[in-house]
Amino acid sequence: MSSSDYETKELTKEKKLWDVYWASRRLPHSKFNTITTIMVFILLIINSWLTQQPIDETLKFVREISSSGLSISLSTLGFLLSGFTIFATVSQPSLFLGMSEIPHPDSGLSYLKHNFFIFLRVFIFYIAFATLCLLITVLGHKGGLISLLVSYSPHPEEIKFTLVKIAYIFICTFYYFLLMQLKSFVFNIYHAVMTSLRWKAEGYE
């Protein structure tokens, strides 16, 4: 197999979205996004511990934010996919092929896959969040499967309290995490457009 054949097959190496996510785990996360997400997580734990809000009110909030989160994540995902599709189709193929030949020093992937996986990773996070919200909405409503299973447990009130607190902390942290991913996505779109313009300005057509 020639080196050119190998590089061509590398472009289609990933066969499933899971393969893309697994490869994208090598990509570094923004330190700002990571640190602030951890801070929000800690603040939510403190808030959940100190709040005097009845557990039923917290449960109602979790159900409402899950329902709205499903709609918001799917709508946002639609806009992101539309914008990314337009960007990918109007960019010069010569730029992408040139990027595929240069390894990124941080991830070891080519610059092409490094940049594209950054975008696709955001899509995967939104899909995961939408799935979480869907499961909570479908299974966690009043009289749903989760409520039924909790009622059959030896300590239903304690389990209900624990599950609601965990769901509140996790889903609110996920909300903030997605906002930070959206911030990074906007910059990455800008950076990709500037790279494309620089490629054209320097005559690499």
Image (tube, grey):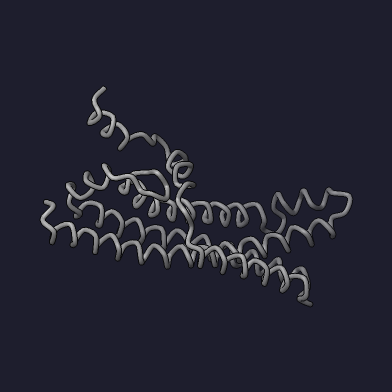
Q: Is residue 25 above or below residue 76?
A: above
Q: Residue at x 64, y 61 (%)?
A: 170
Q: Position of residue 138 (x, y in %)?
A: 61, 53
Q: Position of residue 56 (x, y in %)?
A: 75, 68
Q: Residue at x 39, y 62 (%)?
A: 185
Name the foreground residue: 104 vs 177. 104
Q: Position of residue 89 (x, y in %)?
A: 22, 51
Q: Does residue 158 appear to the left or right of 148 in the view shown?
A: right
Which quarter shows the N terminus? top left
Q: Residue at x 67, y 68 (%)?
A: 42
Q: Is residue 45 above or below residue 87?
A: below
Name the foreground residue: 141 vs 124. 124
Name the foreground residue: 106 vs 187. 106
Q: Does residue 96 appear to the left or right of 147 in the view shown?
A: left
Give the number of callouts: 0
Farthest residue to the front: give it. 105
Quarter holding residue 3: top left
Q: Residue at x 78, y 75 (%)?
A: 50
Farthest residue to the right: give it. 154
Farthest residue to the top: give it. 1
Name the foreground residue: 125 vs 77. 125
Q: Position of residue 86 (x, y in %)?
A: 25, 56
Q: Is residue 122 above or below residue 50?
A: above
Q: Does residue 153 appear to the left or right of 32 in the view shown?
A: right
